Image (cartoon, helix red, strand yellow):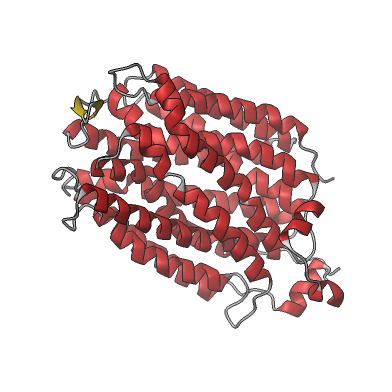
Amino acid sequence: MKAKPDLSFWKLWNLSFGFFGVQIAYALQSANISRIFSTLGADPHDLSYFWILPPLMGIIVQPIVGIASDKTWCRFGRRIPYLFIGALVAILVMCLLPNAGSFGMSIGAAMIFGLIALMFLDTSINMAMQPFKMLVGDMVNEKQKGLAYSIQSFLCNAGSLVGYVFPFVLAWIGIRNTAPEGVIPDSVIFSFYIGAAILILCAIYTTAKVKEWPPKEYAEYHGITIEENKEKTNVFKLLVKAPSAFWTVGLVQFFCWSAFMFMWTYTNGSIALNVFDTPVIENMGKVVLDTKSTQYQEAANWVGVVFAVQAIGSVLWAMAIPFFKNRKLAYIVSLVLGGIGFISIYFVHDPYTLFASFLLIGCAWAAMLALPFTILTNALSGGHMGTYLGLFNGTICVPQIVAAALGGTILSLFTPHGSVAPEVDMLVLAGILLLAGAVSVLIIKEKK
């Protein structure tokens, strides 16, 4: 097998730069979906069900992209065509989703429109996101893979930072942050427009700068014989042959991604009630937060700010992770710090003190972005890199689907009769899940 060459820093940078734009889109979705559907009239106990769609589309789309791109070759490459198509669809949907309440539809129709738009948005984001993970696996040698995924983690968090703060910054410069009942504020709508523009520019940059290896050269670098190239297999056979790291890292992923699904779903309500003292109203016999109040919309903008702080914490911690000589120890410490961060939110009632909690959560996020893929791709070889990475995405999507399906039921157990839902309890549960993930790291056996 021909050894993969060392790549310059800027070639490694270019492999992942488009992730910056994709992550802006993902951050806008993550920080604003609960806000959008709550504004449209969704009950807090039903919010988690709206979050089933994103991971459900991911578990369908990413393996398909992986399998298809393994067998694709054209003048633009193997992975990049899927990035470009995904980005084009994403920018269209990003212009439609935040306008779900602006077309004069009934509440039910607006929610259905929003769900369909969300489905297409996450499908396209997943299609655009997966090629970047594959490009590193395809073109980077084992010696540089840690650096490559660290660069990807940095760009991912930088994109998150930008996407999270857009509504806050736009409101600060005077864009309207409140709107009539059932209508999304302009600060959110224009944030999606700007994010869409940045995404397409990043996709164009990657397409112009990254030149993938043609099939013959790719086969030489990956030790693929003519027979293996012609081999016909299916995902079930590949799963049977998957290295043990695929499954053990997958268990850790289950706890981690369940925790972050609860964060994305319930941070809005937690901060609105516990920190911004949002007033409550009775709606159809239930006590809920007043989503058209100034306090709620200010809290929703602050969620973007604390998520941005989380991204900053992730960037800083990502620079510290390489100093750990033991990768598993770095993984454990990161998840423990994140667990402490989640649990501490229960005791915080000041908006600025939340920064400490979310800096700690950023430590877990940094580890989740880099370490699982480093461990897995080091255990993989041959011509099915894209397929395995697509299948591995199931360890990200399945826990989110489970958490979204059970979230409303669990929250109901925590909610006293006649009281507003204590969404912050779900963040405490998220912290416990991260601690369980830290314990699970101990069973991972890395390839030497």
Residue displayed at 29% across by 50% down:
111
Residue displayed at 74% across by 73% down:
218
Quadrant in the picture for residue 277: top left
Q: Nearest the camera: 333 or 287? A: 287
Determine if residue 341 is in view.
Answer: no
Determine if residue 360 is in view.
Answer: yes
Above or below 270: residue 396:
below
Q: Residue furthest bottom?
A: 75
Q: Quadrant of the N terminus?
A: bottom right
Q: How many marks?
A: 0
Image position, residue 194 (x, y; %): 31, 59
Image position, residue 90 (x, y; %): 40, 63
Above or below 429: residue 237:
below
Image position, residue 313 (x, y; %): 49, 36
Residue displayed at 38% across by 26% down:
423
Q: Nearest the camera: 140 or 66? A: 66
Q: Is residue 68 left or right of residue 100?
A: right
